[in-house]
Image (cartoon, helix red, strand yellow):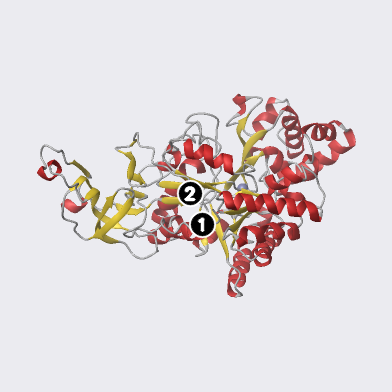
Amino acid sequence: MARFGLPVVLVASAALTPWLGRAQPAPYDLVLRNGRVIDGTGLPWYHSDVALRGDTIVRIAPVIDGPATREIDVAGQVIAPGFIDIHTHARRGINQVPTAPNYIRQGVTTVMEGPDGSSPVPLGPFFEQLEALPKSINIGSFIGQGSVRAAVIGNVDRKATPEEIIRMQALVEQGMKDGAVGLSTGLFYVPGTFTPTAEVIELAKVAGRYGGMHESHQRDDASKVVESVRETIAIGEGGGLPTQISHHKVIGSAYWGKSVETLRLVDEARARGVDVTIDQYPYTASATSVSAALLPAWALEGTRQAQLDRLHDPATRAKIKSESAAMIRDERGGGDPKNVQFASCGFDPSLAGKTLADLTRLRGLDPTIENGAEVTMWLVEQGGCQGIFHAMGDADLERILAHPMTMIASDGEIPVFGQASPHPRSYGTFARVLGVYVRDKRVIRLEEAVRKMTSFPAARLKLTDRGVLRPGMKADIAVFDPARVRDTATYTQPHQYAEGFLVVIVNGQIVFEKNDMTAARPGRVLYGPGK
Ligand SMILES: [Zn+2]
């Protein structure tokens, strides 16, 4: 049947189509024909055509007659809303690579910045600069609590004074008025980790007043993951706003299985009226800076010089080393220096892709946990690295993914193709869910996966005109073959694009087709409800 034949791309030329010669324009700019529509709500797919005019979906019907400037026969492939990635580090790379092919080529049409408590402060100039940037992808941002705290108090371990809380609230308010979608926290990181929960709640109240949400890189995802989930819920409850556990995970084999309890806490909170949700990337390795992952937070307080002074004091160094060894043994180190891989090291780019075990050997030491801690301190002295940490279990990953309150988010960035050795999540997150966890392992249904990538994050972000395929909605669309979609980026070969996508459309314009990015730059800045 032609319906399931190879995709055929039809271009109507003015010479062959008389209606284009007349004064009135074609009713449709683009019609996608013969699709299996998955509308983003979780409902089952159905056969349909989809017609666009300008930046908007104008008709969805089994057969759409009438002229169109352009038609594409998608031959039975899935037509879905473009995917919305609620947690990214896209400001790493958006200026160098404004086409964001790593995201577009896996169907992502919107990315959110400002995660983990880290954002530009104030946001206004950042948004202005993004507005001026010709880009393929839509982008928005959170306002980061850690950055706000650093601007008012600095990088130090103490409580805020009432007067400082008022100044921080004013910065959050300004961020929401500038267009932030909510407040992000990174209570795991310096300086967020120095913040008492009650202080976060005072800031969350301001974001909530402007219709924003809270998302958290939790204080701890290892031994204290359950307490950390309780804290994220408490911030939502006390702040009176929706709250989200970002990139939910359980780090350290000693703690694997705790997602049973964390998900129960989420269910119980929702049952009593606290709006808590989750996002997750489909990998058993995390990525962050080596210093944040493998040194205690107290060792990172203050200036770079203060950190170096601690490392140069023999007694303090010994204490840091023993805590670092424990973090390699029980937490992000995954029990072995070989489970820590370098993504990029500013002081020595040749280390990208190597492991902490490799570097320990290069330094003339056996790759034991103790020596790994010694070399970790050495590399922090050299200027530090970004790392990838293999320390999660598949059972937790699948349990969290299957939970209805979990949406998909990459936690990725926009890499410069071929540069450094980034976590493969930047290239593969969405395709991996569709290929591995829908098609191969059958952990969730295809329509449920698409919901987790589209209407669910859109509703969370109050993007009321995106995330669902329906007439009147903005035309952000991903067309893919559910039998072929797959991620190809790996930990050792990360710079590889996802496969199985036929066409990706942003604001009505095709940004990807025929296996290549187009010249279109229709991406917009998307603002939160406070603007
Ligand atoms: Zn994070």
Q: Name the residue under label 1.
A: 461
Q: Is residue 400 left or right of residue 324?
A: left
Q: Name the residue under label 2.
A: 526
Of the residues tagged 2 and 1, which is closer to the observer?
2
Please, is residue 513 above or below residue 278 in the view? above
Q: Which residue is drawn at 37% across and 42% down?
A: 499
* One can see residue 90 in this view: no
Q: How far apart are marks 2 and 1 (CA)?
A: 10 Å
- Relative image position of residue 398 (x, y in whole percent): 52, 58
- Relative image position of residue 482 (x, y in whole percent): 34, 52
Marks 2/1 in contact by CB < 8 Å: the verdict is yes
The tag earlier along the polypeptide, 2 or 1, is: 1
Q: Is residue 514 left or right of residue 299?
A: left
Q: Residue at x 19, y 46 (%)?
A: 25
Q: Is residue 312 left or right of residue 219?
A: right
Q: Which element is circle 1 on?
A: helix
